[in-house]
Amino acid sequence: MSSGNRIFGFIKAERLYLLMLIFIMAANLFVMAHPPEKKDKVSSRKKIAKLMSRQEIMAQERRIRELLEKNRFLGSVITTSAFLSALILLLGLILCVRGLALKLSGRNVMVAYGAPPDVGWGLIDICRIATVFFFFGYVLAFAGSIVSHVLAIKSHDDRLATVLHATIMDIIGISIVLYFVSKKFNGGLASLGISFRNTLRDIRIGVIGYVTTLPILALILVIVITILQITRYDQPTSTALEILYEDSRPKLLLVLTVLVTFLGPIAEEMFFRGFAYPAVRKRLGIKNAMILVSVVFAMLHMNVVAFFPILGLGILLAYLYEKTGSLIPSIAVHVIHNSAVIFLAYLYKIIALPK
């Protein structure tokens, strides 16, 4: 078969996905040509920076002390959290040194309980899922804009729209992965590494792996922040944290918390580790697959500060899946990590942000 016939055959077979891709490209061009209006607002993090620049550090500290004196429970939570954090970091450092010693002695750092299942899909299927996902993302965004315009909704709530869009997209992402696995490849949850036969063991393995890696992730974060401070780079705050800091509606914050701590991790693990990693692993090998999938995973979070910590976390998640053949450890670690971040963000909001 000639190259021309192969190209024609590919276009004919993938015409639906190619049309979706054209739509995505056109939508991108439209968004670039009509950027959203920039609102003149100062983020909560920059508000704090302004206070500090105005020599109001003492007033800020006094306000925090008064808050903690009035709210003894909050003080106990902060003290307990600090103690547990230090204890976990110390334990992680011990486990990390032990793992390094095992590695240097030529022994396995972690016992292998299994391996990711052999899957029938390949790299092209990853591209197909990504295309369908982004297509639905733009369709959903444009549909929301059209509805707002037709109904003449003047008081458009950007934060609510952002949280609802992210929630719906995570549900769509999970649905797309399950559809491809079940309908296209006649598989089930087991094909994605989801099995509940050894749930407690898998969670325990995930927690130990996370605690062991935590000092490394913390060190990476400290190095990145130090470099950014030296270069005076203005660190962007993630959209989720900005909403958490600046909004006070309980229902919206509850949905955001569930999205970040549970729905998001499940959706991301099902795609990146459950679907994408085995396909890339089959083509490029274990180490290359771990690095490549983790790099894409970190890049899609679109946060310069968090890129390398998320990269390290992604490698850990892929390593756990590789060693256990189960997605449960990766999901457990992802949920724990995001829950810890959200918990610390809430503490920061209560203590540091001026009311």
Image (cartoon, grey):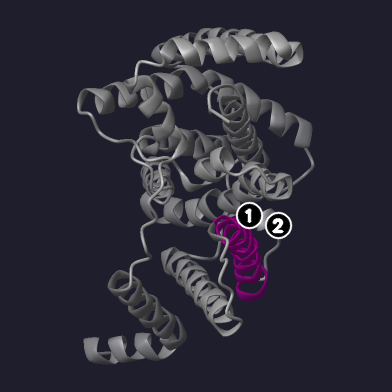
Q: Which residues are magenta?
A: 159-185
Asked which quadrant contains residue 161, the reply is: bottom right
Q: Which residue is mark 2?
A: 189
Q: Residues within 10 Å of mark 1 (few under 14, many from 20)?
A: many
Query: Residue 276: where, in percent of width, then height?
Result: 49, 56
Give the residue furthest to the left. Answer: 231
Residue at the spot 64% in from the left edge and 49% down from the top edge: 259
Query: Residue 95: where, in percent of width, then height?
Result: 54, 12
Name the kind of residue labelled 1 in the image: Leu
**Quadrant that contains the C terminus:** top right
Compared with 151, 155 (above or below) is above
* Left or right of 23 in this view: 186: right
Q: Tell whether position 86 is magenta.
A: no
Label 2 near label 1: C-beta < 8 Å?
yes
* Left or right of 147 in this view: 130: left
Label 1 and label 2: CA atoms lie apart by: 5 Å
Q: Which residue is mark 1?
A: 192
**Quadrant that contains the N terminus:** bottom left
The one nearer the camera, 53 or 22, is 53
Query: Residue 121: where, in percent of width, then height?
Result: 52, 65
